[in-house]
Image: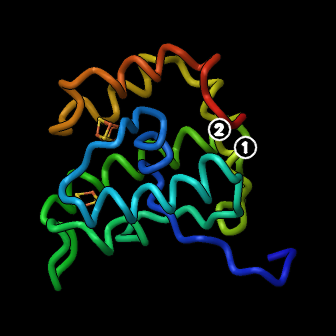
Amino acid sequence: MNRNKVPIILRAHHLLCFLGFRGLGYSKEFVENFKSIYKRVYLGNSYIKVVSFPDKICRCCPNLTAAGCRFEDKVKMYDEKVIELLKVYGLSDLEDVLPSEAYSALKKALPQQLESICRTCEWFALGFCRESFYRKDLWKNG
Ligand code: SF4
Ligand code: SF4
């Protein structure tokens, strides 16, 4: 780590979830918490540590149990695929990352590659996330 400030722990696939965020979520508490992290990470470009386990967003999610996320197998696969893309497109160190660096890497991926990662997510059918994968010109960071 190159600074004193501790990076925000973030599940890799949540980088994609920020792109299609339209204020919806699992519960009021979840949305409030998501918004605050969205502001710091996606809008504010605060340093993150990219992981594949429950993070600060999961902390307020009704799907988080003592044993982890109810959908852990599925979402861990999303995380791993996003991490693979980050690495393929130039990010080797995931410990202390500027979101703008992560999004610069993800911008190099085809929209179809992003789409194929999370099309089994319950939110995918709403279309916001898919649309954001094709509108990279609108991404705040990167
Ligand atoms: S489809 Fe689900 S996992 Fe994928 S970006 Fe949207 S909310 Fe996140
Ligand atoms: S569904 Fe799982 S991965 Fe998604 S925010 Fe909730 S606990 Fe986290």
Percent across and percent down for residue 126 are 21, 25
Looking at the picture, does residue 53 appear above or below residue 111?
below
Q: Secondary structure at mark 2?
A: helix
Along the viewing direction, whichever of 25 and 50 lies nearer the viewer: 25
Decide: marks 1, 2 in contact (CB < 8 A)? yes
Quadrant for ligand 2?
Answer: bottom left
- Residue 6 occupies which quadrant of the picture? bottom right
Question: Is ligand 1 within 8 Å of the beta carbon of the residue shown at mark 2?
Answer: no
Q: Secondary structure at mark 1?
A: helix
Which label number is shown at residue 103? 2
- Residue 1 occupies which quadrant of the picture? bottom right
Q: Is residue 104 left or right of residue 35?
A: right
Amino acid identity at mark 1: Ser
Image quarter (top left, top right, bottom left or bottom right) of the C terminus? top right
Amino acid identity at mark 2: Tyr
Which label number is shown at residue 100? 1
